[in-house]
Image: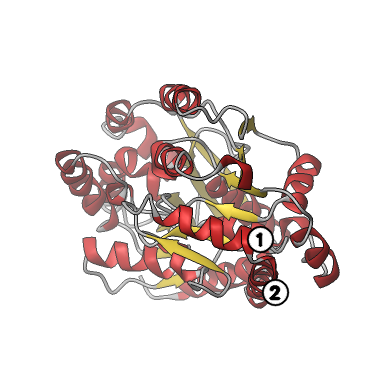
């Protein structure tokens, strides 16, 4: 099967969504498909909208000889008009939306999300099938557009770095004296909730925690600058490290020596970082809003906080710092969660089966 895969920018971009994309392209290729990545230019939302008015992109996609076009849903501003043109052609590829998360669900002013919703609705109504990364994402799509199109949930996996840590290693790490080592694993953008996290941590005794921020710092330079300035203003510079992107070996080292995954105010379409951290025995503190609740069982392998609950983090950190036996039990539960979840090969096999069945459906 010849598959086109449409994204913005480079497939090598270091985010959870692009990790999913890379693994999918590699996996489908290994299963015998011919996959061509079609990279659209990045830029502002308005620039992306203008691309959709060009006839050239439509012609390019029609002439590519594709059986299926998988379209990253975040490319919707450039594709909602293109897809309408494609659907007028009898010999067109099937259109499949890969939905990591719905853009108009992100925290931003209501009027902006209303505008984004109009564009996203229009795009979602043009596709022939959906690949969702979580139940939350599937429900978000269903709330925007009624459809009976084929769909699948193909969960991301956390096995990028191999097997989970042993219970013995986890027990030793958990009971080492000293502060709790917290890790924020994600790009620094508003949706990830770093500013409220810093504000919440400012109320917690700095003797009981350290925070490592691991992820791209240049996706929203203004937001990163605000986070660095707030760190200084709150007097947290001795406890907070902005590490930026790390090579795999360095990331494994940080995960192996941390105690908690800590992103309690982040909106996630799934949250690959949560599951990857659980492979290292890290209970996760995540957000009630979004898909973190599909991985985190409150009080078992982590905790879920409301977006406005800044004081709740202090209570949790104080409890876990004092009660290392409880922290160990939660760490082992986190490992068990990781072990029970699908691995990347399972998710790719499910996508392969879905695409083959979709191609066999009558036009």
* Residue at left offset 39%, top offset 41%: 196
The quadrant of the picture occupied by the N terminus is: bottom right
306, 290: nearer the viewer: 306
Image quadrant where residue 95 sits:
bottom left
- Is any part of residue 75 visible from this angle? yes
**Residue 168 placement (x, y as % from top left):** 85, 69
- Is any part of residue 132 visible from this angle? no
Q: Which element is circle 2 on? A: helix
Q: Kindly identify which residue carries mark 1.
A: 282
**Residue 298 placement (x, y as % from top left):** 48, 72
175, 56: nearer the viewer: 175
How many discs appear? 2
The quadrant of the picture occupied by the C terminus is: bottom left
339, 315: nearer the viewer: 315
* Residue at left offset 38%, top offset 73%: 150
* Residue at left offset 49%, top offset 35%: 188
Is disc 2 surrounded by few (<14), some (14 to 19) or many (20+) residues within 10 Å?
Answer: some
Name which of mark 2 and mark 1 comes first in the sequence.
1
As drawn, 38 above or below 296: above
**Residue 257 placement (x, y as % from top left):** 76, 50
Instruction: Determine whether label 2 and label 1 are within 8 Å by CB.
Output: no
As drawn, 273 above or below 168: above
* Residue at left offset 41%, top offset 50%: 265
22, 139: nearer the viewer: 139
Distance between the Cα atoms at labels 2 and 1? 13 Å
Is disc 1 surrounded by few (<14), some (14 to 19) or many (20+) residues within 10 Å?
Answer: many
Is residue 78 left or right of 350 when viewed as pictured?
left
Q: Kindly identify which residue carries mark 2.
A: 339
As drawn, 207 above or below 286: above
As drawn, 52 above or below 357: above
**Residue 341 placement (x, y as % from top left):** 62, 74
């Amino acid at each position: 099967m010849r598959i086109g895969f449409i994204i913005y920018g480079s497939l090598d971009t270091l985010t959870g969504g692009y990790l999913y994309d890379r693994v999918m392209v590699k996996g489908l290729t290994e299963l015998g498909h011919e996959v061509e990545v079609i990279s659209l230019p990045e830029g502002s939302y308005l620039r992306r909208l203008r691309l959709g008015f060009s006839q050239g992109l439509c012609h390019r996609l029609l002439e590519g000889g594709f059986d299926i076009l998988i379209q990253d849903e975040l490319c919707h501003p450039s594709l909602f008009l293109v897809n309408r043109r494609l659907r007028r052609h009898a010999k067109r590829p099937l259109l499949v939306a890969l939905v990591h998360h719905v853009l108009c669900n992100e925290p931003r002013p209501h009027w902006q999300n209303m505008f984004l919703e109009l564009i996203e609705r229009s795009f979602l109504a043009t596709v022939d099938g959906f690949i969702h990364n979580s139940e939350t994402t599937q429900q978000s799509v269903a709330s925007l557009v009624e459809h009976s199109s084929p769909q699948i949930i193909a969960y991301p996996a956390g096995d990028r770095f191999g097997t989970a840590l042993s219970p013995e290693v986890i027990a030793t790490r958990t009971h080492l004296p000293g502060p709790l080592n917290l890790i924020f694993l994600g790009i620094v953008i508003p949706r990830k909730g770093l500013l409220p996290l810093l504000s919440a941590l400012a109320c917690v005794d700095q003797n009981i925690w350290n925070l490592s921020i691991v992820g791209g710092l240049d996706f929203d330079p203004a937001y990163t600058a605000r986070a660095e300035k707030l760190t200084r203003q709150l007097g947290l510079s001795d406890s907070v490290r902005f590490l930026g992107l790390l090579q795999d070996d360095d990331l494994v080292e940080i995960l192996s020596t941390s105690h908690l995954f800590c992103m309690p105010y982040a909106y996630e379409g799934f949250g690959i970082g949560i599951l990857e951290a659980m492979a290292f025995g890290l209970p996760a503190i995540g957000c009630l809003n979004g898909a973190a609740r599909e991985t985190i069982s409150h009080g078992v392998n982590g905790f879920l906080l409301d977006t406005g609950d800044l004081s709740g983090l202090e209570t949790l950190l104080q409890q876990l710092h004092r009660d290392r036996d409880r922290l160990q039990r939660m760490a082992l539960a986190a490992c068990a969660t990781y072990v029970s979840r699908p691995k990347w090969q399972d998710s790719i096999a499910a996508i392969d089966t879905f695409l083959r069945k979709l191609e066999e459906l009558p036009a």
